[in-house]
Image (spheres, rainbow, N blue to C red):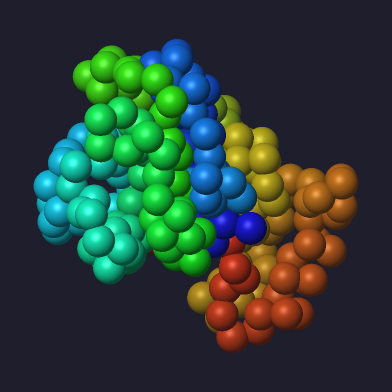
């Protein structure tokens, strides 16, 4: 399982990017990291220089024709490793004059590093791919803002209508699709709302989580200070 799952609204997944017309028209073949296509693509970058990793921030889908990969196996290993260390979402290489097929060294290094590696069998306009993915990312951010505004509106209406904390928590739980708990600073439960997995009672979910994590928040939980 990918240790860096997708975060809704922060971008699109590598899998979704490969399904868009631009990359799909290139007949993409996944050579490494097939189990990590749920990674979030924060942005798209195209480049051909050997030190491209130093120009990235992490989360990018990198498009290249391979001229910056080097000809020696040691250079190719270093190229992939530095990209993986930088934390890019995926490396997409278009086959053509530089490579008829990606070298085994490149593929093996990507597999070892856990980096999704894709080769394109047809030429694609990188600008089209970039525009498509960036449009999806921007639309995702806009949709997230719209959902946040809707939740804020519903919570405000609930409070103005005389509703209390339980009603607000129920709205938040419905929007998140997960149970929501209100605790004291020392971890005592005040309110709980929203069903757990398979309709489990939220109180049972909280007891199970706190029983396993008495001194720290459970993995995957989000803590919000309430003034």
Q: Is residue 136 visible?
A: no
120 in relation to 194, above or below: above
Q: Quadrant of the C terminus?
A: bottom left
User: Residue 143: horizontal and vertical position, in percent?
Assistant: 43, 23
207 vs 147, left or right, is: right
User: Residue 48: horizontal and vertical position, in percent?
Assistant: 16, 41
170 vs 60, left or right, is: right
Residue 162 figure quarter? top right
51 in relation to 112, above or below: above
Q: Tell me what residue is drawn at x 45 percent, y 15 percent.
A: 25
Residue 216 figure quarter? bottom right
Q: Tell me what residue is drawn at x 73 percent, y 80 percent.
A: 212
Q: Quadrant of the N terminus?
A: bottom right
- Which of the pair 124/9 is nearer the observer? 124
Q: Tell me what residue is drawn at x 87 percent, y 52 percent.
A: 200
User: Residue 206: horizontal and vertical position, in percent?
Assistant: 74, 66
- Which of the pair 157/200 is nearer the observer? 200
Q: Tell me what residue is drawn at x 29 percent, y 59 percent.
A: 76
């Amino acid at each position: 399982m990918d240790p860096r799952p997708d975060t809704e609204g922060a971008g699109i997944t590598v899998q979704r990017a490969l399904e868009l017309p631009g990359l799909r028209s290139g007949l993409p073949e996944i050579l490494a990291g097939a189990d990590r296509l749920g990674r979030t693509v924060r942005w798209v970058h195209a480049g051909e220089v050997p030190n491209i990793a130093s120009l990235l921030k992490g989360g990018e889908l990198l498009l290249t024709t391979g001229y910056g990969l080097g000809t020696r196996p040691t250079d190719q290993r270093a190229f992939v490793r530095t990209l993986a260390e930088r934390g890019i979402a995926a490396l997409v290489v278009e086959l053509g004059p530089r490579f008829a097929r990606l070298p085994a060294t490149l593929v093996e290094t990507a597999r070892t590093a856990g980096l999704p590696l894709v080769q394109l069998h047809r030429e694609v306009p990188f600008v089209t791919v970039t525009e498509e993915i960036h449009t999806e990312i921007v639309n995702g951010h806009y949709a997230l803002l719209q959902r946040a505004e809707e939740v804020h509106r519903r919570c405000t209406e609930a409070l103005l209508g005389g509703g209390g904390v339980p009603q607000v928590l129920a709205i938040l739980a419905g929007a998140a699709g997960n149970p929501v708990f209100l605790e004291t600073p020392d971890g005592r439960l005040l309110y709980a709302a929203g069903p757990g997995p398979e309709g489990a009672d939220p109180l049972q979910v909280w007891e199970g989580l706190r029983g396993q994590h008495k001194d720290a928040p459970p993995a995957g939980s989000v803590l919000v200070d309430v003034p």
